[in-house]
Image: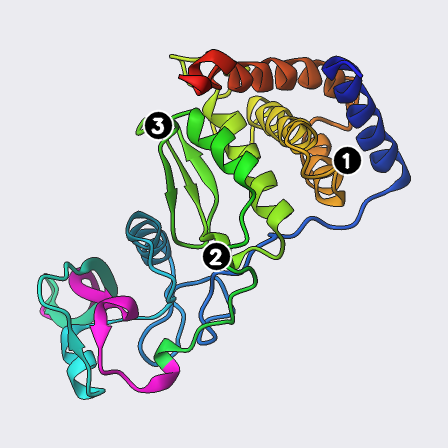
Amino acid sequence: MAKPDIYTRITEKIIADLEAGTRSWHKPWNAEHLAGRITRPLRHNGVAYRGLNIILLWAASIAHGYAAPTWMTYRQALELGGQVRKGSKGQLVIYADKMRKTETDDAGQGREVEIPFMKGYTVFNVDQIEGLPGPYYELTEPILETAKRDATAEAFFAATNADIRHGGNHAFYAVKPDYVQMPLFETFESLEAYYSTLGHEICHWTRHPMRLDRSFGRKRWGDEGYAQEELVAELGAAFLAADLGLSPEPRDEHAAYIAHWLEGLRNDKRFIFQAAAHAQKAVDYLHGLQPKPNEVAA
Protein backbone atom coordinates (compact mmCIF):
# COMPACT_ATOMS: atom_id res chain seq x y z
CA MET A 1 0.00 0.00 0.00
CA ALA A 2 1.41 3.41 -0.93
CA LYS A 3 2.32 5.68 1.95
CA PRO A 4 -0.11 8.46 0.97
CA ASP A 5 -2.90 5.85 1.19
CA ILE A 6 -1.75 4.83 4.67
CA TYR A 7 -1.68 8.46 5.76
CA THR A 8 -5.17 9.05 4.34
CA ARG A 9 -6.49 6.05 6.25
CA ILE A 10 -4.90 7.29 9.47
CA THR A 11 -6.31 10.78 8.99
CA GLU A 12 -9.80 9.44 8.31
CA LYS A 13 -9.59 7.18 11.38
CA ILE A 14 -8.63 10.14 13.58
CA ILE A 15 -11.48 12.23 12.18
CA ALA A 16 -13.89 9.37 12.91
CA ASP A 17 -12.60 9.20 16.48
CA LEU A 18 -13.03 12.96 16.83
CA GLU A 19 -16.60 12.78 15.61
CA ALA A 20 -17.36 9.87 17.95
CA GLY A 21 -15.84 11.67 20.92
CA THR A 22 -12.46 10.96 22.51
CA ARG A 23 -11.14 10.53 26.00
CA SER A 24 -9.18 13.35 27.60
CA TRP A 25 -5.55 13.52 26.57
CA HIS A 26 -2.94 12.78 29.24
CA LYS A 27 0.84 12.84 29.40
CA PRO A 28 2.05 9.31 28.59
CA TRP A 29 5.00 9.63 30.99
CA ASN A 30 5.66 10.24 34.68
CA ALA A 31 9.02 11.72 35.61
CA GLU A 32 8.15 13.01 39.07
CA HIS A 33 9.48 12.02 42.49
CA LEU A 34 7.07 10.59 45.04
CA ALA A 35 7.57 13.81 47.01
CA GLY A 36 5.97 15.86 44.30
CA ARG A 37 2.95 14.46 42.51
CA ILE A 38 1.89 18.04 41.80
CA THR A 39 3.67 19.82 38.99
CA ARG A 40 4.75 22.96 40.85
CA PRO A 41 8.28 23.18 42.27
CA LEU A 42 8.35 22.64 46.05
CA ARG A 43 10.22 24.26 48.94
CA HIS A 44 12.11 22.09 51.42
CA ASN A 45 8.99 21.90 53.60
CA GLY A 46 6.73 20.73 50.76
CA VAL A 47 5.07 24.12 50.20
CA ALA A 48 4.70 24.94 46.50
CA TYR A 49 6.42 27.95 44.94
CA ARG A 50 4.27 30.66 43.41
CA GLY A 51 4.44 33.21 40.59
CA LEU A 52 7.63 33.84 38.66
CA ASN A 53 9.57 31.33 40.77
CA ILE A 54 7.56 28.49 39.19
CA ILE A 55 8.80 29.49 35.73
CA LEU A 56 12.38 30.02 36.92
CA LEU A 57 12.58 26.60 38.57
CA TRP A 58 10.78 24.77 35.76
CA ALA A 59 13.27 26.25 33.28
CA ALA A 60 16.21 25.20 35.47
CA SER A 61 14.84 21.65 35.83
CA ILE A 62 14.47 21.30 32.07
CA ALA A 63 17.90 22.78 31.34
CA HIS A 64 19.70 20.48 33.79
CA GLY A 65 17.47 17.40 33.71
CA TYR A 66 16.39 17.51 37.35
CA ALA A 67 13.62 15.02 38.16
CA ALA A 68 13.09 16.08 41.79
CA PRO A 69 10.51 18.84 42.37
CA THR A 70 12.08 20.01 45.65
CA TRP A 71 14.48 22.94 46.09
CA MET A 72 16.22 24.37 49.16
CA THR A 73 18.91 26.81 50.25
CA TYR A 74 22.43 25.74 51.19
CA ARG A 75 21.65 26.36 54.87
CA GLN A 76 18.41 24.38 54.73
CA ALA A 77 20.29 21.45 53.20
CA LEU A 78 22.83 21.55 56.07
CA GLU A 79 20.06 21.70 58.68
CA LEU A 80 18.55 18.56 57.15
CA GLY A 81 21.90 16.77 57.28
CA GLY A 82 22.66 17.19 53.60
CA GLN A 83 25.51 18.70 51.62
CA VAL A 84 25.35 20.45 48.25
CA ARG A 85 27.77 18.75 45.86
CA LYS A 86 30.95 20.68 45.22
CA GLY A 87 30.75 22.76 42.04
CA SER A 88 26.94 22.79 41.94
CA LYS A 89 25.37 25.98 40.67
CA GLY A 90 22.20 27.18 42.35
CA GLN A 91 19.14 28.85 40.88
CA LEU A 92 18.12 32.38 41.77
CA VAL A 93 14.57 32.75 43.10
CA ILE A 94 12.88 35.89 44.32
CA TYR A 95 11.03 36.85 47.48
CA ALA A 96 8.62 39.76 47.40
CA ASP A 97 6.95 41.33 50.42
CA LYS A 98 6.04 44.66 51.98
CA MET A 99 7.57 46.45 54.94
CA ARG A 100 5.67 48.93 57.07
CA LYS A 101 7.07 52.13 58.46
CA THR A 102 5.70 55.27 60.01
CA GLU A 103 6.20 58.55 58.18
CA THR A 104 5.35 62.07 59.25
CA ASP A 105 3.26 64.05 56.79
CA ASP A 106 3.35 67.80 56.18
CA ALA A 107 0.87 68.37 58.99
CA GLY A 108 3.13 66.61 61.46
CA GLN A 109 0.86 63.60 61.67
CA GLY A 110 2.34 60.13 61.67
CA ARG A 111 0.97 57.60 59.26
CA GLU A 112 1.89 54.04 58.46
CA VAL A 113 2.88 53.28 54.88
CA GLU A 114 3.71 50.05 53.07
CA ILE A 115 6.89 49.85 51.03
CA PRO A 116 7.18 46.89 48.65
CA PHE A 117 10.56 45.22 48.34
CA MET A 118 12.07 42.27 46.52
CA LYS A 119 15.18 40.25 47.23
CA GLY A 120 16.76 37.24 45.62
CA TYR A 121 18.28 34.11 47.10
CA THR A 122 19.81 30.90 45.75
CA VAL A 123 18.32 27.43 45.98
CA PHE A 124 19.56 24.00 44.92
CA ASN A 125 17.61 21.06 43.58
CA VAL A 126 17.49 17.87 45.64
CA ASP A 127 19.31 16.14 42.77
CA GLN A 128 22.32 18.38 43.59
CA ILE A 129 22.37 17.48 47.30
CA GLU A 130 23.76 14.43 49.09
CA GLY A 131 22.84 13.07 52.51
CA LEU A 132 19.25 14.28 52.80
CA PRO A 133 16.64 12.09 54.52
CA GLY A 134 15.44 9.23 52.34
CA PRO A 135 11.99 10.58 51.37
CA TYR A 136 13.61 13.43 49.42
CA TYR A 137 15.14 10.90 47.02
CA GLU A 138 12.24 8.49 46.60
CA LEU A 139 11.40 8.00 42.94
CA THR A 140 8.49 6.44 41.18
CA GLU A 141 9.40 3.05 39.80
CA PRO A 142 10.62 3.14 36.18
CA ILE A 143 7.78 2.22 33.85
CA LEU A 144 9.93 0.97 30.98
CA GLU A 145 13.18 -0.92 31.06
CA THR A 146 16.10 1.00 29.56
CA ALA A 147 17.02 -1.93 27.35
CA LYS A 148 13.52 -2.22 25.87
CA ARG A 149 14.05 0.00 22.84
CA ASP A 150 13.11 -0.36 19.19
CA ALA A 151 16.26 -0.61 17.05
CA THR A 152 14.52 0.57 13.87
CA ALA A 153 13.02 3.64 15.53
CA GLU A 154 16.29 4.46 17.32
CA ALA A 155 18.20 4.35 14.02
CA PHE A 156 15.54 6.44 12.27
CA PHE A 157 15.61 9.30 14.78
CA ALA A 158 19.41 9.16 15.11
CA ALA A 159 19.76 9.57 11.32
CA THR A 160 17.98 12.94 11.48
CA ASN A 161 20.95 14.34 13.46
CA ALA A 162 18.47 16.36 15.52
CA ASP A 163 19.75 17.56 18.89
CA ILE A 164 17.62 15.37 21.20
CA ARG A 165 18.08 15.90 24.94
CA HIS A 166 16.61 13.84 27.77
CA GLY A 167 15.59 14.83 31.29
CA GLY A 168 12.96 16.75 33.18
CA ASN A 169 9.21 16.31 32.96
CA HIS A 170 8.37 18.09 29.70
CA ALA A 171 8.53 17.27 25.99
CA PHE A 172 8.98 20.17 23.59
CA TYR A 173 10.90 21.57 20.63
CA ALA A 174 12.81 24.82 21.20
CA VAL A 175 13.12 26.69 17.89
CA LYS A 176 15.90 29.24 18.45
CA PRO A 177 18.35 26.94 20.24
CA ASP A 178 17.04 24.22 17.86
CA TYR A 179 16.78 21.17 20.10
CA VAL A 180 14.19 18.60 21.18
CA GLN A 181 13.67 17.99 24.90
CA MET A 182 12.27 14.63 26.02
CA PRO A 183 11.58 13.04 29.42
CA LEU A 184 13.69 9.94 30.09
CA PHE A 185 12.73 6.81 28.15
CA GLU A 186 12.13 4.86 31.37
CA THR A 187 9.39 7.24 32.51
CA PHE A 188 6.99 6.48 29.61
CA GLU A 189 4.06 4.12 30.03
CA SER A 190 4.90 2.22 26.85
CA LEU A 191 7.49 1.96 24.10
CA GLU A 192 4.93 3.23 21.58
CA ALA A 193 4.15 6.26 23.76
CA TYR A 194 7.82 7.24 23.88
CA TYR A 195 8.40 7.05 20.14
CA SER A 196 5.06 8.69 19.38
CA THR A 197 5.98 11.63 21.62
CA LEU A 198 9.45 11.83 20.08
CA GLY A 199 7.88 11.69 16.61
CA HIS A 200 5.62 14.61 17.53
CA GLU A 201 8.56 16.75 18.64
CA ILE A 202 10.71 15.74 15.65
CA CYS A 203 7.88 16.82 13.34
CA HIS A 204 7.99 20.20 15.09
CA TRP A 205 11.77 20.16 14.47
CA THR A 206 11.12 20.10 10.70
CA ARG A 207 9.41 23.52 10.86
CA HIS A 208 12.72 25.32 11.51
CA PRO A 209 13.51 28.05 8.90
CA MET A 210 16.53 26.04 7.76
CA ARG A 211 14.30 23.02 7.04
CA LEU A 212 10.67 23.33 5.92
CA ASP A 213 10.19 26.89 7.22
CA ARG A 214 6.64 26.26 8.43
CA SER A 215 5.07 28.93 10.68
CA PHE A 216 1.35 29.36 9.81
CA GLY A 217 1.79 32.99 10.86
CA ARG A 218 2.00 32.06 14.54
CA LYS A 219 2.88 34.93 16.83
CA ARG A 220 2.27 33.63 20.33
CA TRP A 221 1.54 30.48 22.31
CA GLY A 222 -2.01 29.23 21.83
CA ASP A 223 -2.96 31.28 18.76
CA GLU A 224 -4.41 29.75 15.59
CA GLY A 225 -0.98 29.25 14.02
CA TYR A 226 0.14 27.40 17.14
CA ALA A 227 -2.93 25.15 16.98
CA GLN A 228 -2.29 24.41 13.30
CA GLU A 229 1.30 23.43 14.00
CA GLU A 230 0.16 21.09 16.79
CA LEU A 231 -2.20 19.34 14.38
CA VAL A 232 0.63 18.86 11.89
CA ALA A 233 2.98 17.45 14.54
CA GLU A 234 0.41 15.04 15.97
CA LEU A 235 -0.65 13.73 12.56
CA GLY A 236 3.02 13.40 11.64
CA ALA A 237 3.60 11.39 14.83
CA ALA A 238 0.79 9.01 13.82
CA PHE A 239 2.24 8.66 10.31
CA LEU A 240 5.71 7.91 11.68
CA ALA A 241 4.33 5.29 14.08
CA ALA A 242 2.83 3.49 11.08
CA ASP A 243 6.00 3.84 8.99
CA LEU A 244 8.19 2.48 11.80
CA GLY A 245 5.89 -0.45 12.47
CA LEU A 246 5.15 0.70 16.01
CA SER A 247 1.38 0.89 15.69
CA PRO A 248 -0.81 -0.31 12.79
CA GLU A 249 -3.57 2.06 13.88
CA PRO A 250 -3.32 5.57 15.34
CA ARG A 251 -3.25 5.48 19.15
CA ASP A 252 -6.16 6.94 21.09
CA GLU A 253 -3.88 9.70 22.32
CA HIS A 254 -3.51 11.15 18.81
CA ALA A 255 -7.21 11.91 18.37
CA ALA A 256 -7.60 13.05 21.98
CA TYR A 257 -4.67 15.45 21.68
CA ILE A 258 -5.87 16.81 18.34
CA ALA A 259 -9.39 17.34 19.72
CA HIS A 260 -7.98 19.92 22.13
CA TRP A 261 -6.43 21.96 19.34
CA LEU A 262 -9.40 21.64 17.00
CA GLU A 263 -11.44 23.36 19.68
CA GLY A 264 -9.07 26.30 19.33
CA LEU A 265 -9.79 26.32 15.59
CA ARG A 266 -13.54 26.65 16.22
CA ASN A 267 -13.96 22.96 15.36
CA ASP A 268 -12.98 23.57 11.74
CA LYS A 269 -12.17 19.94 10.97
CA ARG A 270 -11.59 20.78 7.32
CA PHE A 271 -8.18 22.06 8.26
CA ILE A 272 -7.15 18.59 9.36
CA PHE A 273 -6.84 17.57 5.70
CA GLN A 274 -4.52 20.51 5.02
CA ALA A 275 -2.61 19.64 8.19
CA ALA A 276 -2.30 16.08 6.92
CA ALA A 277 -0.61 17.35 3.76
CA HIS A 278 1.89 19.35 5.83
CA ALA A 279 2.42 16.35 8.10
CA GLN A 280 3.15 14.12 5.12
CA LYS A 281 5.67 16.67 3.86
CA ALA A 282 7.35 16.71 7.29
CA VAL A 283 7.52 12.92 7.44
CA ASP A 284 8.82 12.74 3.86
CA TYR A 285 11.54 15.22 4.87
CA LEU A 286 12.54 12.97 7.79
CA HIS A 287 12.63 9.92 5.50
CA GLY A 288 14.85 11.91 3.15
CA LEU A 289 17.45 12.20 5.94
CA GLN A 290 17.80 8.43 6.23
CA PRO A 291 20.90 6.77 4.74
CA LYS A 292 20.47 5.26 1.30
CA PRO A 293 20.92 1.47 0.91
CA ASN A 294 24.34 1.85 -0.71
CA GLU A 295 25.42 4.21 2.13
CA VAL A 296 24.45 1.59 4.70
CA ALA A 297 26.38 -1.09 2.80
CA ALA A 298 29.46 1.11 2.66
* Residue 259 picture location, percent across and down: 74, 37
Residue 109 inside the magenta-drawn segment: yes
Q: Which mark is residue 248?
A: 1
Local SS, label 3 = loop
Frontmost of labels 1 and 3 is 1
Local SS, label 1 = loop
At 20% from the left and 79% from the top, the residue drawn is 77
- Closer to the chain start, of discs 1 and 2, is 2
Measure the C-alpha gap from mark 1 to mark 2.
Answer: 24 Å
Crowding near the residue tagged with mark 3, few <14, some 14–19, many ≥20 C-alpha atoms within 10 Å? few
Residue underneath mark 2: 146
Q: Would you identify the image quadrant in which residue 97 lies?
A: bottom left
Residue underneath mark 3: 178
Three-letter code for the amino acid on which mark 1 is drawn: Pro
Residue 100 inside the magenta-drawn segment: no
At 74% from the left and 14% from the top, the residue drawn is 4
Q: Would you identify the image quadrant in which residue 258 lies?
A: top right
